[in-house]
Image: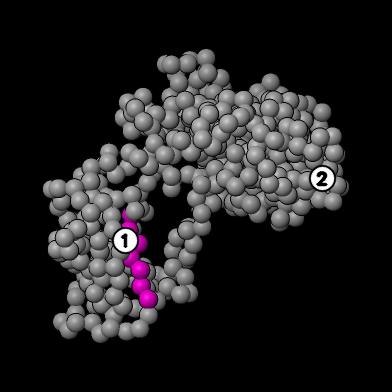
Amino acid sequence: MQIGGVIGGTWWRRVRYLNVGVVLAACLLVIAAVGPKPSAAAPRATSGSAFVRDNQLGYATSSQAKRAYLMASAAETGATFSVRNASGATVYTAPIGVNLGKWSRSYPDVYSLDFSSLAVAVAGTYTIAVSGPIAATSPSFRIDTGTNVYGGALANSLRFYQTQRDGPNYIPNALRTAPSHLNDQNAMTYLTPSANSSGAFSGDLSPLGPRIDASGGWWDAGDYLKFVQTTSYTVDVLLAGVRDFPSQMGSGSASSNFTAEAKFGADWLLRMWDDATQTLYYQVGIGEGNAKTRGDHDIWRLPQADDTYGGSDPVFRYIRNRPAFRAGPPGSLSSPNLAGRDAAALAEASQVFRTSDPAFANRALLAAEHIFDLANTNPSGNLLTVIPFSFYPENEWRDDQFPQMRSGG
């Protein structure tokens, strides 16, 4: 899922999906820092701008890690920061941490503000004030129990996935009033076209003949395309949460039980794999069209309109009957990033549903083993991600290959 945005800069990794950890983890990246000793003289004020970025969900009272970040347009040598309660009283003060590098040209200096040692006995609202060459004050934030801080975010995340459901098994709510893309249940399969960096291709698509049930899954954010590349990562994260944090994301939670939603995603991944022919399909729908056809990004509409969009007009044929793209011929090796991540998600599904749905778990494990076996660990050229590659570029696959997933362990 394209949940995340660009968390740019030279010391952050560019993340485009789900993705995903941003919505579910609901926490700051932890970067260890050691603060310099304060200077003897008060720092001299300089012109410029600075901002304090804190965790707007808040910080758990039981958590030792409490950090914010100071972004400045110039060096903040000698600066200190204070944590203040709702009454304005200072409850903690310390020097800022070391310079971590730049965020952008406008903010070349970023510092960690570590207040992990602040002991909070009573939940409350706080702010951070920086005194130094460029003063700054943070937005207010809560320090409270982990449940109060993160419980709402997890519940909202679950509702997000439920609203993004594609196919007949949608969940009615204020944003969803009808099922969508029912024609995906009988999707024609196609060869991957040669597309430019924006996704445009020449001529027409080349049908392969077999049809598959590509219904279900979640839309990508901002459009209605569906990708194994992003969905497999999302299912990995959801299942790991259900398995490892059952009280927060599994059956022990009354407001954020992701068990059914994780299975919904895993079920779509199984639809995109034909175990009988050992064939992997990796995408449903096209983003950009051309002079003879329209793609998803060429029109604005509700998803339930697609099955009959444009009547019989051939220009909208791939809106009404969305193509499913094949990763390679039956039995051929698959791009290792797709194979590894997909196999890991299905192996996790076999763990989570081993007791509650053993037939589903066994099917998922068998598919995981077969997909993993067909991973091409000596790829050449670009890895296969989506059409076009520039939407989700990826040049590393070894982090997607988990040998322990072979046995579902």
Q: Where is residue 311 in the image (x, y as percent from the top left)?
A: 81, 35
- Contact between marks 2 and 1 (CB within 8 A): the answer is no
Q: How far apart are marks 2 and 1 (CA)?
A: 48 Å
Q: Between residues 46 and 342, which one lies in front from this camera angle?
A: 46
Residue pictured at 25% horizontal, 61% vertical: 127
Residue type marked 1: Pro
Residue pictured at 33% horizontal, 65% vertical: 52
Q: Between residues 329 and 217, which one lies in front from this camera angle?
A: 217
Residue type marked 2: Thr
Q: In this view, does 142 lie above or below 39?
A: above
> Any magenta on residue 192?
no
The local secondary structure at tag 2 comes to loop
> Any magenta on residue 53?
yes
The local secondary structure at tag 1 comes to loop
Whether residue 196 is visible to the viewer of this picture, yes or no, is yes
Dot 1 alpha-carbon crowd within 10 angstroms: few under 14, some 14 to 19, many 20 or more: some
- Indicate the quadrant where residue 310 lies: top right
Q: Which of marks 2 and 1 is nearer the N terminus?
A: 1
Tell me the residue that label 2 is attached to.
293
Magenta residues, as a range?
A: 49-55
Quadrant for the C terminus in the image: top left
